[in-house]
Amino acid sequence: MGKPEIYPTLFINALKKYCEKSGIIKEAYILWIFIPSEKKPPHLLIGLKFDGDRDEIFNEVSVQIKEYVSKDEFIDIMKIEKNEFYDYFKNDGEMIFQENIIGKK
């Protein structure tokens, strides 16, 4: 696990824009992942911390990023909470969005 080898700027910008507009996403991370036993190529893993319907959020994110992902690319999306995966994202990934809680009621 780690950061992507080639930084996907357009993809990240689209994801950030969605997170800012959604009002639901609290944190968003990207992580470059490779698990040889899964027989998948190295790929991006998006970690999202949010309250709400997982399927709805994942579908909305997929729509927002699809034009920046080639047919050959594989991307996973994961809901993260305070567990071991959250630690991976915090330590090895890159935070690309954090909700601004100052002034929020």
Image (spheres, helix red, strand yellow):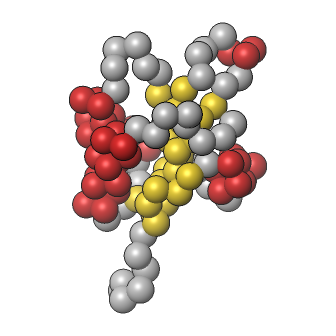
Measured along the vertical axis of the image, is residue 62 above or below residue 21?
above
Q: Is residue 61 left or right of residue 73?
A: left
**Residue 44 point in image, percent of width and height:** 52, 33
Q: Which residue is more in the foreground, 14 or 85? A: 14
Residue at screen point 73% across, 16% down? 36
Q: Quadrant of the N terminus?
A: top right
- Residue 16 shows up from this direction: yes
Count up the numbered dots. 0
Q: Position of residue 82 (x, y in %)?
A: 67, 58
> What residue appears at the point 41 percent right and 76 percent down from the top-left corner?
100
Which image quarter: residue 8? top left
Residue at 26 percent of width and 40 percent of height: 64
Residue toward you, 7 or 62: 7
- Depth order, front residue of 6/105: 6
Q: Give residue 57's quadrant in the image.
A: top left
Q: Position of residue 62 (x, y in %)?
A: 33, 34
Residue 39: x, y in percent?
66, 10
Instruction: Give the quarter of the figure containing the C terminus.
Output: bottom left
Residue occupying the point 41% across, 86% down:
102
The residue closer to the viewer here, 56 or 94, is 94
